[in-house]
Amino acid sequence: MQPANLLYIISDQHNRDALGCYGHPVVQTPNLDRLSERGTRFANAYTNCAICVPVRASLATGRYVHQIRAWDNAHPYDGSVESWHHRLREQGHTIDSIGKLHFSGPDNDHGFSNEVEPLHVVEGVGDLLGCIREEAPFRKKRGGILNAGPGDSTYLQYDKRNADSGIAWLDAHKDADKPWACFLSFVCPHPPYIAPQEMFDLYAGGDLPWPKQWKESDWPAHGAMDYFRRFFDFGPPQFTEAEIQNMMAAYFGACTYVDAQIGRVLDHLEDLGLAESTRVVYTSDHGEHFGSRGIYGKFTMYDDACAVPMIAAGPGIPAGKVTSTPVSLIDTFQTAVECVGATYSEADADLSGESMFAIASEPDRDRTIFSEYHAVGSEHAFYMVRDRDYKYVHYVNDQPQLFDCSADPDEVNDLSQDASHAATVERYEVKLREIVEPEREDANAKTDQKAKLDSFGGIDAALARGAFDNSPVPGEEPAFRKAK
């Protein structure tokens, strides 16, 4: 593959199925659909942790959360483990970021040549309360669903500025004599569940396709899922049908909004004549349940939260192709290095990923994808391995889950307790333990989380600091509230 520029576009909390090109019957994403038509769409792409800060550290370093000990939203990437940004910059490539990073803050070198209006963790610290894993204070998220609707938000405003900055950045670098990389990061459709009126109106009216297992009678009975619902106050009782539909209209409207901002940048890329010398990636850091299984937000290993959209287009990438080869966000490291024609260092020899561009050009094949979770709303760690046949989820101190990916794409039939699948459960647990020692890393996370709390004065100090719903955009003050 010949060296080319890389425009890596990432959103926040975009459910994989909430795009037209992924088959959603209602959601309008014409610009991403067009990108998919001229490139390759990955049908089985996954996050390596379904919450913002840890997976963004994994995406940067090409390493799993437990390998870099980036456990939760109070353990942000600080540049101490080299990233693909470092690798490109040290070889003379311009590598800039625009928008949300959720890294440690301006006092640390994250590897970029320049960070344009970055959104980092609050006060360089992040969500300390997420480090409390035993008898943690519950979060009241119910109001976020009840207050969903049309309007304006600092996130919508920020993403317009991010698109403006992306357009200006392309203008400034259109004549570069060496392949560049730009990491363009939007924050929508992450909550608050607010969309511009005209985009909310596209979906308002109460006739949207219902999410999977949305009815309380159909909620999967699993200890970890029950705990998430109690922890975040999602129910029971469940929200009314009108409340769920209203929230979905706002979320889908935000998906259409971020698609429009991305479209502005992609149109300008074409207008400048850069489309033939630039490879474009679109993805998200994790998904969104929007009411499926009685859960709102991310967190879980269901595809609602753990699967991500992944689209790649540009020179050398097959057009109009859909590949079933599993990929994950840690594949970004090799994708970026090989795209611009950079080389690896000795420190990269043990990385687990592969170039997604190379995968797109190959016949479909099997791979095993790994994800993990040690963060807010969980009492103990849980882990996932997924290939083209099965998804296996391992919960420390709870029963596992096993889903047949072909026969049960909606993940409503847990096979883990079926005696006829006992050998499959055992086989996938072996696969998991080849990657991670679940109990050991659960203990490591809790040790590090306690140390983080102690370094800020202990649990009482974290409780006094309080909680905040969403990280503020640059220049906005965090809205702390008393922890309960």
Image (tube, rainbow, N blue to C red):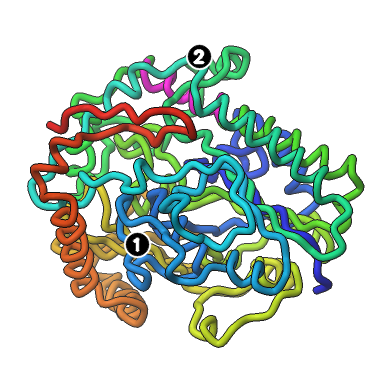
Residue drawn at point x = 37 percent, y = 34 percent: 470
Q: Is residue 198 left or right of residue 94?
A: left
Q: Is residue 5 left or right of residue 381?
A: right
Q: Position of residue 436 (x, y in %)?
A: 31, 76
Where, by quadrant of the figure, is residue 181 drawn? bottom right
Is residue 146 placed above or below 431 in the rendered structure?
above
Q: Secondary structure at mark 1?
A: loop
Q: Residues within 10 Å of mark 2 (few under 14, many from 20)?
A: many
Where, by quadrant of the figure, is residue 390 drawn? bottom left
Q: Going from the N terminus, do you reach mark 2 or mark 1 first?
A: 1
- Amino acid on which the number 1 mark rests in the picture: Ala
Q: Secondary structure at mark 2?
A: strand
Residue 389 at least partly seen? yes
Q: Is residue 180 left or right of residue 119?
A: right
Q: Nearer the viewer, residue 269 or 216?
A: 269
Residue extent of the magenta highlight: 243-254
Q: Main secondary structure of the magenta part?
A: helix
Give the alpha-carbon distance from disc 2 to disc 1, as whole Å. Answer: 35 Å
Q: Is residue 422 magenta?
A: no
Q: Which residue is mark 1?
A: 70
Residue drawn at point x = 42 percent, y = 26 percent: 192
Q: Position of residue 1 (x, y in %)?
A: 80, 74
Q: Nearer the viewer, mark 2 or mark 1?
A: 1
Q: Is residue 455 left or right of residue 415?
A: left
Give the total of numbered labels.
2
Q: Which residue is mark 2?
A: 150
Is residue 458 placed above or below 230 in the rendered structure?
below
